[in-house]
Image (spheres, helix red, strand yellow):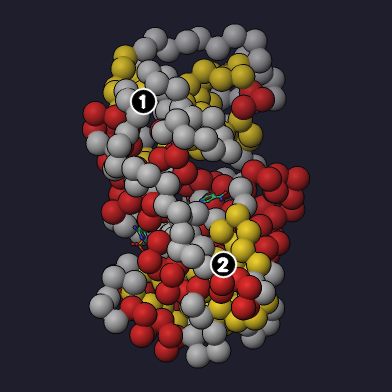
Amino acid sequence: NEQIVLAKRPEGVPGDDVFRFEEVEVEQPSSGEVLVKPLYISVDPYMRGRMSDAKSYVAPYELDKPLQGHIVGEIVESKDDAFKEGDHVVGVLPWQRYITVTTDRISKIQNTDVPLHLYLSTLGMTGQTAYHGLLKIGQPKEGETVVVSAASGAVGSVVGQIAKLKGARVVGIAGGEEKVNYLTETLGFDAGVDYKADDFEESFKTAVPDGVDVYFENVGGEVSDVVLKQLNTFARVPVCGTISSYNNREEDIGPRIQGILVKTQALMQGFIVGNYSDDFEAAGKELAEWVQNDRIHTEVSIEEGFENVPKAFRYLFEGKNFGKQVVKV
Ligand code: NDP
């Protein structure tokens, strides 16, 4: 058995020296436990925050302990009558080749007719994030303009597609021509804008002739500065993440947008998906329906091999992932 532990707290983008591979025994499950073999390991931007010890909504990863996150796996041995060998499960689990856990930490995947990695994306945490952030805080109305950044990614792609289902005009922001074309050609967005292009601000203004009613914030930084200048009166800004600053050595304070908030009377609200857990079941059903009726498309980038989990994690900050990044073990 092998696990990946946090060897040190990163400064900047986590290099290989932040992760240490260690040999450990496979623990035999006792009563109420199961042995899980991971099939897909999720890598997510929020993990960068947990690698540091700064104050946050979730405890930092402990040094010299295995990193953990959402994993879809198969049960290889069970000491709990509710789970049998071959069952597929999902849970927040340590990065290990074999994991012994009590069954209160996993849930059984009931529908295995869809690709299992969807339970790490649209039918899992990132789908829930998009759903609640957009519908509860963004509250898009028919005909309004919804803008989303990191638009081709796991959360952003679902935000834009749900906004389309609600009758909004959707503009996505992403890095590079290939991703921008994907937004309009595959996801059905009304426009895509490349934030890496020299004329980003001009192209963005052209793409939102009626201004911005909802801005679903995933990246922060300079992209955000450009979008916020186009907010309409009573706009809503669900702040989901600010990935552009996650590897900064100091907290990114600013831009000074309070003036914009006063003038537009806009609402800007940060949120954490876990806060909506009471509604996960209902949202999960709706998301599953959309997925099965091909109303929501999910792109996935699959990196092969447990040894490549750290590399796949870094892809998120390099924009090398296309859609949800997972590692197939
Ligand atoms: P994505 O699949 O969107 O992957 C990350 C993407 O971010 C990259 O592909 C890249 O896209 C973009 N990116 C990376 N660096 C920068 C940068 N410096 N400037 C602009 N864009 C950048 O990840 P997720 O969908 O999982 O996460 C998206 C956001 O949602 C993150 O901020 C994350 O922290 C947040 N989140 C928040 C949750 C919550 O509960 N609040 C829960 C889950 C996610 P490109 O190539 O287009 O640059």
* Contact? badges 2 and 1 (CB < 8 Å): no
Residue 281 appears in the picture as rendered? no
Residue type at mark 1?
Answer: Leu
Quadrant, the N terminus: top left
Mark 2 neighbour density, 10 Å: few (under 14) some (14–19) many (20 or more): few
- Residue under label 2: 258
Q: Is residue 317 above or below residue 162?
A: above
Q: Position of residue 68 (x, y in %)?
A: 46, 30
Q: Foreground residue, 279 or 302? A: 279
> Residue 86 versus residue 304: which sits nearer the camera?
304
Question: Which is more toward the observer, 38 or 154?
Answer: 154
Residue 315 pos. (x, y %):
30, 49
Measuring 38% from the left and 55% from the top, which residue is drawn there? 244
Whether residue 35 is visible = yes
What residue is rendered at 40% in x and 61% in y?
A: 221
Residue 53 found in image quarter: top left
Q: Secondary structure at mark 1?
A: strand
Q: Nearer the viewer, residue 255 or 266?
A: 255
* Image: 42 above or below 136: above
The quadrant of the picture showing ligand 1 is bottom left
